[in-house]
Amino acid sequence: MTRIGVIGGTGYTGSNIVHEAASRGHTVVSVARRPSDHRAPGAIYLEGSILDAPDLVESIEGVEVVVFAVAPRGDMAGNVRSAIAEIVRELPGHVRIGVIGGTGGSLVEPGGPRVVDVDFPEAYKAESLELIGVLDDLEASPTSCDWFYVHPAAGYGGMAPGERTGSYRVGGDVMLVQEDGESFISGADLAMAIVDEIESPRHRRERFTLGY
């Protein structure tokens, strides 16, 4: 079993990942600024912030994989990219990094524009661009740094949690769209895909898309 740290582990995405990983018997350390009333049996819950890199890195000592599920919005806007970069620098070199990004950095079509550059809601553009910056930093990191970065489907989010179906599709750079034109994945199925990637890595220093 793997020891996994989930930063932002009490949020929508993070909590789904914590519950999925813990249900499979992994040792999971959730770090978040806010406590949760819906704790996964067997998971370890700690209070902490990505803005305090030294304390956070110390609190998750011994983890083999760290998944960042933190959104740069509210008082975190403008702070997430630099904070993740600092934590990645301070983590031991053998720790694998996972980042849950946004849809905005994926492409509309092969070789085409990014989603964020085509009719994207202005209210979410800064958040999307900051998460794209995190991807830029990972791509520029030393080759010894092992990471994966995920672009969820366009309709993904806590406002539409959906249900666990036990299935998902994995794509490359292009946003995944269903035959009916919808782009969606539930929180539970995205978490399943993330833990599958942790258990059986298929994307080394790569980004990929998830959807139905």
Image (tube, rainbow, N blue to C red):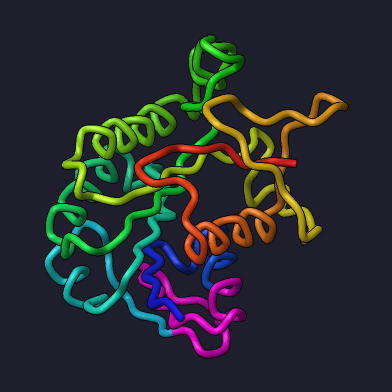
Which quadrant of the structure image shows residue 20? bottom right
- Judging depth in this view, the residue of 30 and 35 nearest the camera is 30
Farthest-out residue, bottom: 42
Residue 158, x across and y down, in percent: 64, 52
Which quadrant of the structure image shows residue 87? bottom left
Residue 52 visible, this orientation:
no
Which quadrant of the structure image shows residue 120? top right
**Left or right, 126 with reference to 106:** left
| Residue depicted at x 32% and y 47% | 76
| Residue depicted at x 58% and y 25% | 174
- Judging depth in this view, the residue of 134 and 128 nearest the camera is 134
Q: Is residue 66 above or below residue 43?
A: above
| Residue depicted at x 19% and y 49% | 144
**Left or right, 66 with reference to 105:** left
Residue 130, x across and y down, in percent: 34, 33
Provide the residue span drawn in magenta: 19-43
**Left or right, 172 with reference to 136:** right
Residue 164, x across and y down, in percent: 77, 61
- Judging depth in this view, the residue of 87 and 55 nearest the camera is 87
| Residue depicted at x 75% and y 41% | 212
Residue 95 visible, this orientation:
yes
**Left or right, 110 with reference to 189:** left
Q: Is residue 200 magenta?
A: no
Q: Is residue 171 above or below residue 79?
A: above
